[in-house]
Amino acid sequence: MSGATMRFDTSKFEKFALSLGADVQYQSVEFVGQQVNDLKQASLAEVPTVTGALAGSIYTEVAAGVHGATGEVGYGGRGNVNPVTGAPVDSYIMGVHEDLDASHPNGKAKFLEDPARKLAEQYDEKVAITLFKAIDKYQGG
């Protein structure tokens, strides 16, 4: 072969991208799981706990999907019943969460929304840190 030739080989890049992709997927599930747990703990610290039924109805879900991980923290929806009144938690959860004028011996309204908003302020930074850790791990750092 005569003349000047420049050959490009993307095999190292492809290996890096595939490895990074698998690690980022794993890291995203771990990341979402940690965010879900952080929100759960922060919310439980603020939920009114007269009988414990509302706090006992908390649930979390984390799932890996094709395009990333998803997570959910919620209350009710699982058939929980207040042991004192016999009322389904679902029948009063929205009132307890939304009524800013209600007085609670402990806890407060917006027990899920307020912690979620506070944690959301740190979300972008946490995503970046998680991504950089995955890249650093691949590069042997």
Image (tube, grey):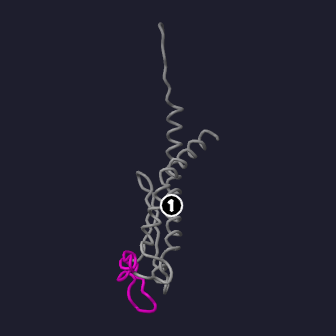
Q: In this view, does 9 lie above or below 53?
A: above
Q: How crowded is mark 1: few (under 14 residues within 10 Å), some or many (20 or more)?
A: many
Q: Between residues 123 and 106, which one lies in front from this camera angle?
A: 106
Q: Residue furthest top?
A: 2
Left or right: 105, with 91 as reference point: right
> x, y (%) of residue 27?
53, 52
Specify the amino acid type for callout 1: Gln
> x, y (%) of residue 89?
40, 82
Q: Between residues 46 and 139, which one lies in front from this camera angle?
A: 46
Q: What stretch is highlighted in magenta?
A: 78-101
Q: In which quarter of the image is the C terminus?
A: top right
Give the secondary structure at mark 1: helix
Q: Is residue 6 above or below residue 109?
A: above
Q: In this view, does 57 lie above or below 73?
A: below
Residue 135 location, quadrant: top right
> x, y (%) of residue 6?
48, 16
Q: Residue furthest front?
A: 101
Residue 77 magenta-highlighted? no
Residue 84 magenta-highlighted? yes
Residue located 46% across and 76% down the image: 108
> x, y (%) of residue 139?
60, 38
Residue located 41% across and 92% down the image: 85
Q: Between residues 134 and 106, which one lies in front from this camera angle?
A: 106
Residue located beneath label 1 in the image: 35
